[in-house]
Image (spheres, rainbow, N blue to C red):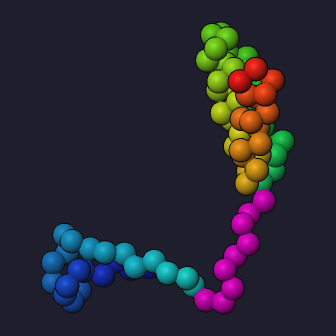
Amino acid sequence: MPAVPVGGSAAAETERCAVVVGPVSGRPREPLRISQPHFALPAVLAAAGSDPLEAALDAVWHAVGTYGEHCAVLPAEVRSVCGG
């Protein structure tokens, strides 16, 4: 979508621009589904890190992204397993 100068025509200031973003038309798109195996790969790679604490935290961080819209489930499960 082309930028439109704020408060003027296209021949006016070119330094200050605003981009108008809105719905295209029709129904809003459904959220895209992710490939969980592909999203899980960074968690597996992070778990192999040399610093155990950093590896664990990075692995959990990446694994949470794999859960998508249910992302609150994994941290709650980790807390219950770790006695938190």
Is 30 magenta? The answer is yes
Q: From this view, report whether residue 12 is shown above or below residue 43.
A: below
Image location (x, y in percent) of residue 20:
40, 79
Location of residue 15 in the rendering, given as x and y in whole percent from the top left corner: 19, 69
* Nearer-the-camera pick, 51 or 3: 51
Residue 41 visible: no
Q: Is residue 49 above or below residue 35?
A: above
Residue located 78% across and 28% down the image = 80
**For residue 77: magenta?**
no
Q: Is residue 22 above or below residue 43?
A: below
Q: Quadrant of residue 51?
A: top right
Horizontally, is 49 left or right of 22 in the view? right
Q: Residue at x 73, y 72 (%)?
A: 30
Q: Start and end of the magenta stretch?
A: 25-33
Q: Relative to residue 29, is residue 15 drawn left or right?
A: left
- Examine the image and state in which quarter residue 38 appears: top right
Q: Give me the residue at 30% from left, 81% from top.
A: 4
Q: Quadrant of residue 2?
A: bottom left
Residue 48: percent from left, percent from top: 73, 17
